[in-house]
Image (cartoon, rainbow, N blue to C red):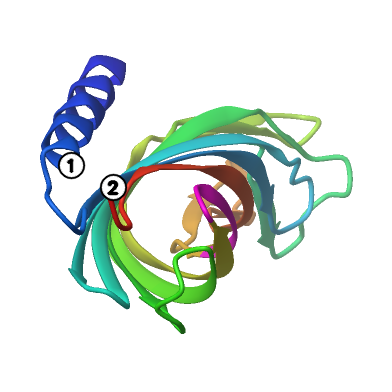
Amino acid sequence: MKKLFFAIAILIVALSSNAQEYKPFKVDLALGYAVPGGKGAKGGVLFAIEPKYAVMDKLVVGLRMEAAVVARGYAGTNVEEDMSVDVKASGSYLATADYFYTGNHKFRAFSGVGTGIFSIAAASVSTGSETVAAGSGSKFGGLVRSGIEAGHFRFAVEYNLVPKTKLVTEDNTTIESKNGYIGFKIGATIGGGKK
């Protein structure tokens, strides 16, 4: 997976370096902090790479590939207070679109949306007396985000909308593992803008 991300990034950088006046191709690289919701949730690190193409000066489409390492939260009926969820990495592959409010490439605010597949890692929930495994799988979800770009610096806040995973323990306790999270990202943009 890392080799694929690296190959795509090199290809896009190479293509964007050959543009004449305006570089429609760019790649966003970001690190950040992911904050999941629910009881027992623990935040963690995230990494994202997003090749993009400027359809017009204010509209950019892309493909966000992200990995987030978090302990998902839980909710449900008869949920015990001493439950714990282990930390796992999850990935996502989303088609995105960002709208920039100005044409000024030195400083501009944006808002965006995305939709695609979230790959949920297997996790286990300990209820004190037993451990229930939540299997891995894929969920269709989306994101909404806002942020700023200042030159090649980028800051964004994203809310990843991912459906919950349901588990039933041996004593018929229903536990829902919350898969959505908020991401706070800081990163750099390679390419794009005027030559």
- Is the residue 149 above or below the residue 65 in the image? below
Say which amino acid is labelled 2.
Lys
Instruction: Give percent across and percent down for residue 142.
Output: 37, 67
Q: Is residue 42 left or right of residue 100?
A: right
Q: Is residue 150 left or right of residue 103?
A: right
| Among the 4 quarters of the image, the one containing residue 57 | bottom left
Residue in the foreground of this view, choosing between 154 and 123? 154
The correct choice, above or below, for 165 with respect to 158 in the image is above
Mark 1 vs mark 2: which is more N-terminal? 1
* Image depth: mark 1 or mark 2 in front: 1
Which residue appears at 23% of the width and 64% of the height?
61
Residue furthest toward the right? 81
Quarter-of-image position of residue 82:
top right
Q: State the residue position of label 2.
A: 26
Q: Main secondary structure of the magenta part?
A: strand
Residue drawn at x 83%, y 50% as measured from the top left: 80
Q: Which residues are magenta?
A: 151-159
- Can you say which quadrant of the picture contains the N terminus? top left
Q: Is residue 123 magenta?
A: no
Farthest-out residue, bottom = 101
* Residue 68 visible in rendering: no
Q: Which residue is mark 1?
A: 16
How far is mark 1 from mark 2, CA to CA? 7 Å
Residue 132 location, x and y as percent?
58, 34
Q: Nearer the viewer, residue 88 or 22?
A: 22
Q: Verify CB contact (< 8 Å) between mark 1 and mark 2.
A: yes
Who is closer to the viewer here, 35 or 177?
35
Residue 107: % across, % down: 56, 67
For label 1, count other residues whose C-alpha is less than 10 Å away and answer few (under 14), some (14-19) or many (20+). many
**Which quarter of the figure has residue 2?**
top left
* Residue 189 visible, this angle: yes
Disc 2 crowd, CA 10 A, few/some/many (<14, 14-19, 20+): many
